[in-house]
Image (spheres, helix red, strand yellow):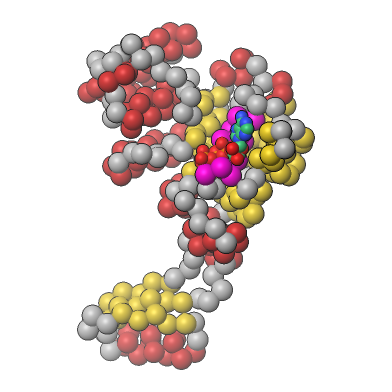
Amino acid sequence: MTDQRVIEVKRVAKSFNKHTALQNVSFSVQAGEIFGFLGPSGSGKTTTIKLLTGQLAQTSGHAFVLGKPVEQINESIYEQVGIVTDNSGVYEKLTVYQNMAVLAKILGVDRQRVDHLLKRVGLMEHKKKLAHQLSKGMTQRLILARALLHKPRVLFLDEPTSGLDPSTAEAVHELLMEIKDSGTAIFLTTHNMEEATKLCDHVALLNEGVIVEHGVPKEVCLKYNKTRQYRVQLVTGAEKVLLHSDEASKQIHEWMSQDQLLTIHSCEPTLETVFLEVTGRKLV
Ligand SMILES: Nc1ncnc2c1ncn2[C@@H]1O[C@H](COP(=O)(O)OP(=O)(O)OP(=O)(O)O)[C@@H](O)[C@H]1O
């Protein structure tokens, strides 16, 4: 893969008075990649987004977005960046459609794209509703649709699916995959490990402001797969967990040849259990 780093963070630290929120954080995100920043509440995820979008200054280290040092970020970069956080204010007294149309006009984006995005986030049938009448999930989807109007090269998402029902979360996931495939780099924070495993090309696990593990989700999980177990279900209904061994392999072979095996799964750890093993803490 050619190197197309659109976000680069080098040994960044951030302190608020005496409290250290981030320590020696380094990572990079490529074009067309979803990068997940995972950590429990208070671990420094939002602080990182704020640093990378010019809303906060780091205490030390260097960070670049689209090649530009973050301390030099000004309004011109927002033409290429989309940000979805809790404070992405919508105009409460305007309708869903007007919220989109006002911004589309400023950005010089045509109405077709407004319609396309409203459909994609499932808000077309609510387009005449006033923003203050929307549920939390609808508001989140409106903020996401607005952030995508100008086809940003980089998208920052703070907990994109928290509070969404499973089918809406799934629709948002599909949209994010489509945006990634079009070459946008997506930086998202989450404490939902399943979401991260499914969506992210790379993840970094953050604990108390420190990246404690990082990599491709499946590879991170396999690295901690020390016991190598298999869960099997037999046609009799019996369920068994077998440790990787010659004996287990013979047994599985026997069940297979006797057509006794209904299901078989390897039991590698999830990102959740990796986090617990590395930090001794739960994610949520
Ligand atoms: N403006 C601020 N002043 C002082 N401390 C702050 C400020 N912003 C964040 N912090 C502290 O920095 C730490 C990291 O906060 P941050 O909001 O980045 O966490 P988070 O991982 O996004 O948490 P959550 O998942 O709950 O949103 C916390 O201890 C928080 O109290």
Residue 60 visible from this viewpoint: yes
Q: Is residue 103 left or right of residue 122?
A: right
State whether residue 268 is above or below residue 17.
below
Where residue 193 sits: x, y (%)? 46, 52
Where residue 100 sits: x, y (%)? 38, 16
Q: What's the residue at 62%, 24% (across, down)?
A: 55
Q: What's the residue at 27%, 20% (across, down)?
A: 133
Q: Say which quarter of the image contains residue 5.
A: top right
Q: Residue furthest right?
A: 60
Q: How many numbered marks, from 0 up?
A: 0
State whether residue 26 is above or below residue 87.
below
Q: Quadrant of ligand 1?
A: top right
Say if the magenta span includes residue 231: no
Q: Is residue 171 left or right of residue 146?
A: left
Where residue 110 sits: x, y (%)? 39, 12
Q: What's the residue at 27%, 82% (across, down)?
A: 238
Residue 184 visible from this viewpoint: no
Q: Which residues are magenta?
A: 41-52
State whether residue 42 is above or below residue 68.
below
**Observer-nearest residue: 281 or 60?**
281
Quarter of the picture containing the N terminus is top right
**Observer-nearest residue: 59 or 19?**
19
Q: Is residue 62 left or right of residue 200?
A: right
Q: Say which quarter of the image contains residue 123.
A: top left
**Observer-nearest residue: 97 or 277?**
277
Magenta stretch, main secondary structure, is helix
